[in-house]
Amino acid sequence: MTSEPEPISEAARQALERELADVRSERDSVAATLRDSDTVGDLADGADELRRAGDLDRLDARIDEITTRLRQAADAGPPPADVVGVGSTVTVRFEDGTEDTFQIGALADVLDPALITADSPLGHALLGRRAGDSVSYRAPEGQLTAVVVSLGGG
């Protein structure tokens, strides 16, 4: 992947926004459990307080990651329409004649089998390609080829 900001699909943007809301809510819950530093307690209370402070740091870091990714995606603009890029929907014909439509994403989503990441072998091979281009990529079955049928889901 390049160091340039990568666009993301609307579905990926919505997923990140939902995650951001969830993480912020969790952060608020954890922050509400932290006591004033003036309160004196036993060692177990102190250890629990340290764990929650660590949780707070982890949640803050994830909030920063998500907000940065959303900002970078906005700066990158929409996915390209004429070449395969992150955020593109692409239909591919495989060697056996079957066709599948995928969305190229920056983040994997185990709940969405139609999403492949840009850094997966097929996703990486598709980046920058146009309709009619043939790609070659390594899969568990060995070296495979596919043809880009169309962009935009059609």
Image: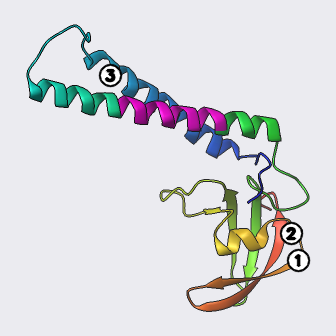
Q: Quadrant of residue 71?
A: top right
Scheme of colours in the image? rainbow
Q: SS class of the residue under badge 2?
A: loop
In the image, residue 121 above or below residue 83: below
The Cα atoms of the two marked residues, 3 and 2, are separated by 46 Å
Q: Which residue is mark 3?
A: 29
Disc 1 element: loop
User: Residue 80 placed where, x, y %?
Assistant: 86, 52
Vertical side of 41 occupied by 5: above or below: below
Residue type (three-letter) at the residue carrying disc 3: Ser
| Residue 149: x %, y % from top left | 83, 73
Mark 1 to mark 2 CA distance (whole Å): 6 Å
Q: Which residue is mark 2?
A: 129
Q: To which residue does mark 1 refer?
A: 133
Q: Quadrant of residue 48?
A: top left
Give above or below for 47 relative to 129: above
Q: Name the residue rendered at 52%, 56% in the picture.
A: 109
Contact, mark 1 vs mark 2 (Cβ under 8 Å):
yes
- What element does badge 3 sit on? helix
Which of label 3 and label 2 is nearer to you? 3
Q: Amino acid at mark 2?
A: Arg
